[in-house]
Image: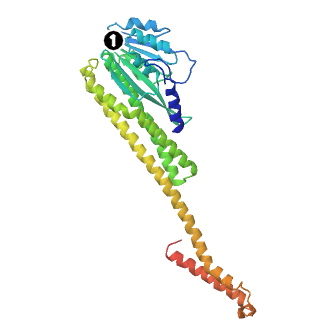
Amino acid sequence: MTKLINRLSKKRLKTLGQPPGTLIFTGEKKTEEITITIIDYDENQYQEKKVKTVEECFPFKETPTVTWININGLHEPYIIEQVGEYFNIHPLILEDILNITQRPKLDDLGDYIYIILKMLSYDEGKRRIDIEQVSFLLGSNFVISFQEKEGDVFNPIRERIRTGKGRVRKMGADYLAYALIDAVVDNYFIILEQLGEEVELLEEELLTNPAPETSVKIHAMKRELIFLRRSIWPLRELIYVLERGESKIIKKATLLFLRDVYDHTVQVIDSVEAFRDIVSGMLDTYLSSLSNRMNEVMKVLTLIATIFIPLTFIAGIYGMNFHFMPELAWRWAYPIVWIVMCTIGILMLFLFKRKKWL
């Protein structure tokens, strides 16, 4: 968690001392080419194409159809600046798009709504959750999405637009924004399912064969859940503001769908909280397990020491080497001492067994 906080702090340092609205990408430097995809549609027609320049997006601003402009890559701020200039986006909003350390939030600026979400993916190789910031600009007839890199959870929506299935082609840009948000939230359930499997494996390891590495895994899982909670928790307030219906961009027909997303968000948050409680309990169980194992070891050592205390006492007496000790000259003294010592040891073992100390 400390490394993560340090990494986020370093990203924020890039913008310190800069005037408000300065466009600086706070992510890692990339060399990949930024890709821009346009999907324009209504109930009767649909077109999709990739464009090489931002200027090719401009004619779609005033069309009566719904336009979805998706920009993959934020490492060239001048492209974001061009989008902002033509679509009349506030410089502070453009700054937030490039600052990928933002929490999920919503800004309603009247003519458009700005939304920040965290899109999750699970890295099977590294066995960790990767978090990517996704920003949306929702206008009366357009949605512009900004992603850090290629790859997202929106392919089912693209397919519904292409095939005309569902309501998306019959509704407006606000419904498209809802569908994109819903795809992000639904993907949380997939991530939580994979995370639940990790928690179950960790719990099984804790109960069957806890090792020092188990503690490291528990702490790593706890850090994942803390960061996951930080990325998801503000989403509930964001959806709540949208589904109240105070924005003129959100139509009444879309509000019911937003309420459904709100319910899903509450379920996700409840699941994250449940996992946090389980992992916190696992840490307590691990510490209790270590304490119990230590107690068992100390118990065995104490019993062994208790058995040898009277035997040591007898050996100490006959190790004093006084001249006038009659037993030392007796022929059967040595075997009798052994018999007495063994009898004491056996009787003490029997006593401990009877008291269920062994």
Q: Describe the element under mark 1 as helix, strand or loop.
A: loop
The residue closer to the viewer here, 15 or 48, is 15
> Residue at the spot x=41%, y=37% of the render?
229
Number of numbered callouts drawn: 1
Q: Residues within 10 Å of mark 1 (few under 14, many from 20)?
A: some
x then y, percent, for residue 280: 44, 48
The amino acid pointed to by label 1 is Asp
In this figure, which residue is indicated by the disc labeled 1? 42
x then y, percent, for residue 170: 30, 16
Q: Is residue 215 above or below residue 130?
A: below
Position of residue 284 in the picture relative to residue 179 (left or right):
right
Residue situated furthest front in the rendering: 17
For the question of whether residue 205 can be seen, the reply is yes
Q: Is residue 332 above or below residue 157?
A: below
Position of residue 166 in the picture relative to residue 336 (left or right):
left
> Residue at the spot x=37%, y=32% of the render?
234
Quadrant showing the C terminus: bottom right
x then y, percent, for residue 21: 43, 17
